[in-house]
Amino acid sequence: MKKILFVILLFTTSTICYAQNTDLKHYYDISQGFDGWAMAIYLENIAKNDLAGHEKEFMDFVNDELSKKFTPATKLTKNNNWLFHKALNEWDYEKDEVYAVVCADSKYAKDGIFIFTVIMGENDFLWCAYSVKEEDLNNIDDLFK
């Protein structure tokens, strides 16, 4: 099981490196006071790797690995939660899909939130979030070394 998880994480790392060259999208809702930049990147469908039913174990493994590099965020602000959903809604996401979402207050922010999520249902997500700085994302290809 750990070998399969490690292969997925290596794939994830290379995909996130691609995401560094992907533009964040600006979202705002003046009436609710939400404003920021975000993007969601599709990473994998864990059912294709026989991990369906092992989502919790997968997320525990991911969290253990990512917590070594980033500062965990146990709670999202209302603005980051809203940005997370706006970015994910750009996709026709389905159960067992894995996404990486980056949220920031501005396009040129030096820090933000990185959210790794598994879709469990229409409005049901397993996720782990991390506070990240620009230099963290610049070195993200070294994540699992």
Image (spheres, rainbow, N blue to C red):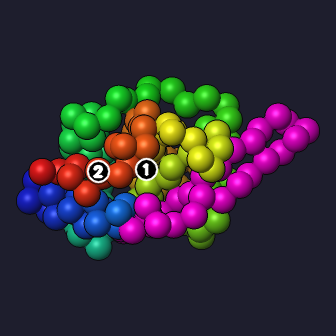
Side of 59 where 107 appears, left or right: right
Q: Residue furthest right?
A: 31
Residue 33 position within the rendered picture, expressed as x and y whole percent measured from the top left: 82, 34
What kind of secondary structure does the magenta stretch mostly adopt?
strand
Residue segment shown in magenta: 18-45
Return the mark for residue 11.
none
Q: 10 Å neighbourhood of mark 1: few (<14), some, or many (≥20)? A: many
The image quarter containing residue 133 is: top left
State the CA–CA distance, disc 2 to disc 1.
20 Å
Total of numbered circles in the picture?
A: 2
Q: Residue furthest bottom?
A: 48
Whether residue 44 is visible, yes or no, is yes
Q: Tell me which amino acid carries mark 1.
A: Thr
Identify the residue under disc 2: 139
Return the mark for residue 117.
1
Q: 10 Å neighbourhood of mark 2: few (<14), some, or many (≥20)? A: few
Question: Is the residue under label 1 in contact with that under label 2 (CB below 8 Å)?
Answer: no
The image quarter containing residue 24 is: bottom right
Compared to residue 67, the image places residue 134 above or below, namely: below
Side of 54 where 105 appears, left or right: right
Compared to residue 71, the image places residue 133 above or below, namely: below
Sequence order check: which comes first, mark 2 or mark 1?
A: 1
- Residue 94, magenta (yes or no): no
Residue 122 position within the rendered picture, expressed as x and y whole percent measured from the top left: 59, 56
Which numbered disc, 2 or 1, marks the residue closer to the eye? 2
Nearer the observer, 117 or 68: 68
Find numbered disc 1 in the image and state the secondary structure of the residue it sits on: strand
Residue at image location 25% in from the left, 37% down from the top:
69
Residue at image location 36% in from the left, 43% down from the top:
135
- Residue 31, magenta (yes or no): yes
